[in-house]
Image (tube, grey):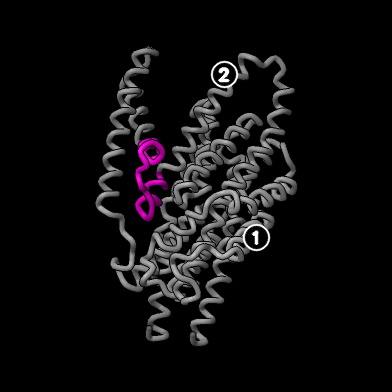
């Protein structure tokens, strides 16, 4: 290996770890925003607990997400240390810009955008791992089935509850659309991964978090209303339970998001000839990636924490517990199937879901619109940065 290639490999590993650090700095809000907002823990204690749980995440969950990042976006045959380095640079730049402005953006999708941008610049559409026709039409089939079943269930509920049929049918169809693919993955083993899964779950994961959190909070509220005679005691109990929920969510974050750097480092080592694509992830890659995201959480992303903790809705301890458990559950499910979803999307959706149980007006939809805008433009913006960077470097060095 020549000197330039060696430098690129080392630089790529460093920037991958820097990406995970930035990831932790932005995504700290996902795990501690609600527990800080309800004063269950001080910000410093919350960050320390979240950091420990996040570090343990990659050892608890599988490394399927790392494989998606390393091999599921750009064809491994075309990956070089330079392509991977530029893709990482585009992702890191976008995440840090958003963190400085307090925008809870998706670090995972920033990385996906960075890889797509540099892949298209380097070799065009042929460099990208596009979904198979079987996967694409399978997705359409299950989405269609989900919508039809959702509409029928909505109409049935409207008749039974004497509610507006049209509204319930639309709501049922929407919920069916959101749940269709996740249910198919669990029940019939539908194989769904790669770019198509990432793009679909940009829409599905926040709404799935919202639906799960809404249902969980609604059931919890009814149980509390029936059996609770001492609300203040329950408040204190849920503040303690929130700590466990926040830890679970942090562990889920570490299990999904820490694997971003693992996948990139693995891809860099494979492209440089140090490993083959069939090898297992080296232990030092797992340890350093987990440590980087943990240190990022310890550094704190206070602007993001404030926006997610109090900018969306006012949260009570039982709602904070519900949001943390719901967000962690959705994220854990995605991690098992190797889908690098946004923990930000899941967490924000869960906070919205628990807020909606008090009425639509309980949610600050202006803040939600700002966040959704950032989510939508993340992949293209990170992609444009990487695309332009590759073209400039190609012109300068004659690649």
Between 252 and 381, the one nearer to me in the picture: 252
Q: Quick one: SS at disc 2?
A: helix
Judge by depth and name the residue closer to the eye, 78 or 378.
78
Task: Label 1: state its secondary structure.
Answer: helix
- Total residue callouts: 2
**Alpha carbon separation for disc pair 2 and 1:** 41 Å
Residue plotted at (56% across, 63% down): 19
Residue 183 percent across, percent down from the top left: 39, 36
Q: Is residue 193 magenta?
A: yes
Crowding at mark 1 (Cα within 10 Å: few <14, some 14-19, many 20+): many
Up-down: is 279 above or below 391? above
Q: Which residues are magenta?
A: 178-203
Q: Position of residue 51 (x, y in %)?
A: 67, 52
Asked if the stretch drawn in magenta spans residue 287, the answer is no
Instruction: Relative to 117, say whether 138 is above or below.
Output: above
**Magenta span dominant secondary structure:** helix
Q: Who's the residue at 48% across and 29% down the image?
A: 360
Would residue 389 appear left or right of 3 to someone viewing this image?
left
Residue 39 visible in image: yes
Quarter holding the C terminus is bottom left
First in sequence: mark 2 vs mark 1:
2
Q: Which mark is drawn over residue 54?
A: none
**In the drawing, what numbered circle is on residue 291?**
1
Residue at the extreme front: 279
Q: Quadrant of residue 141?
A: top left
Position in image of residue 163 (x %, y %): 37, 16
The residue labelled by disc 2 is 222
Please indicate whether residue 133 sits to the left or right of residue 87 in the image: left
Which residue sits at x=59%, y=58%?
Answer: 100
Q: Position of residue 145 (x, y in %)?
A: 28, 33
Would you call the spot at circle 2 few (<14 residues within 10 Å), some (14-19), or many (20 or more)?
Answer: few
């Amino acid at each position: 290996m020549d000197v330039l290639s060696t430098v690129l490999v080392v630089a790529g590993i460093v920037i991958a770890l820097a990406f995970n650090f930035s990831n932790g700095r932005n995504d700290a809000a996902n795990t501690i925003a609600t527990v800080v907002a309800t004063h269950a823990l001080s910000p410093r204690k919350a960050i320390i607990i979240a950091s420990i749980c996040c570090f343990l995440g990659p050892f608890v969950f599988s490394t399927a997400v790392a494989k998606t990042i390393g091999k599921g976006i750009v064809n491994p045959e075309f990956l070089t240390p330079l392509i991977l380095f530029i893709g990482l640079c585009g992702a890191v730049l976008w995440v840090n810009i958003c963190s400085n402005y307090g925008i809870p953006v998706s670090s995972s999708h920033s990385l996906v955008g960075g890889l797509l941008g540099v892949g298209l610049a380097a070799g065009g559409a042929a460099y990208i791992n596009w979904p198979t026709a079987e996967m694409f039409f399978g997705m359409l089939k299950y989405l269609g089935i989900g919508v039809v079943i959702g509409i029928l269930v909505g109409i049935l509920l409207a008749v039974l509850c004497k509610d507006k049929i049209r509204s319930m049918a639309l709501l049922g169809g929407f919920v069916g659309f959101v749940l269709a693919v996740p249910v198919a993955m669990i029940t019939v083993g539908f194989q769904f991964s790669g770019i198509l899964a990432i793009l679909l779950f940009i829409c599905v994961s926040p709404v799935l978090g919202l639906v799960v959190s809404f249902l969980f909070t609604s059931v919890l509220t009814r149980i509390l209303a029936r059996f609770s005679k001492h609300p203040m005691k329950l408040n204190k109990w849920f503040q303690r339970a929130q700590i466990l929920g926040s830890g679970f969510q942090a562990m889920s974050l570490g299990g999904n998001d820490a694997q971003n750097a693992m996948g990139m480092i693995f891809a860099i080592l494979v492209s440089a000839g140090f490993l083959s694509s069939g090898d297992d992830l080296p232990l030092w890659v797992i340890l350093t990636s987990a440590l980087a995201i943990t240190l990022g959480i310890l550094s704190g992303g206070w602007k993001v924490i404030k926006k997610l903790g109090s900018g969306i809705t006012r949260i009570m301890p039982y709602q904070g517990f519900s949001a943390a458990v719901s967000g962690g559950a959705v994220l854990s499910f995605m991690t098992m199937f190797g889908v690098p979803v946004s923990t930000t999307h899941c967490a924000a959706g869960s906070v919205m879901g628990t807020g909606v149980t008090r009425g639509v007006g309980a949610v600050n939809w202006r803040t939600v619109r700002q966040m959704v805008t950032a989510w939508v433009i993340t992949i293209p913006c990170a992609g444009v940065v990487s695309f332009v960077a590759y073209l400039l470097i190609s012109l300068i060095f004659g690649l």
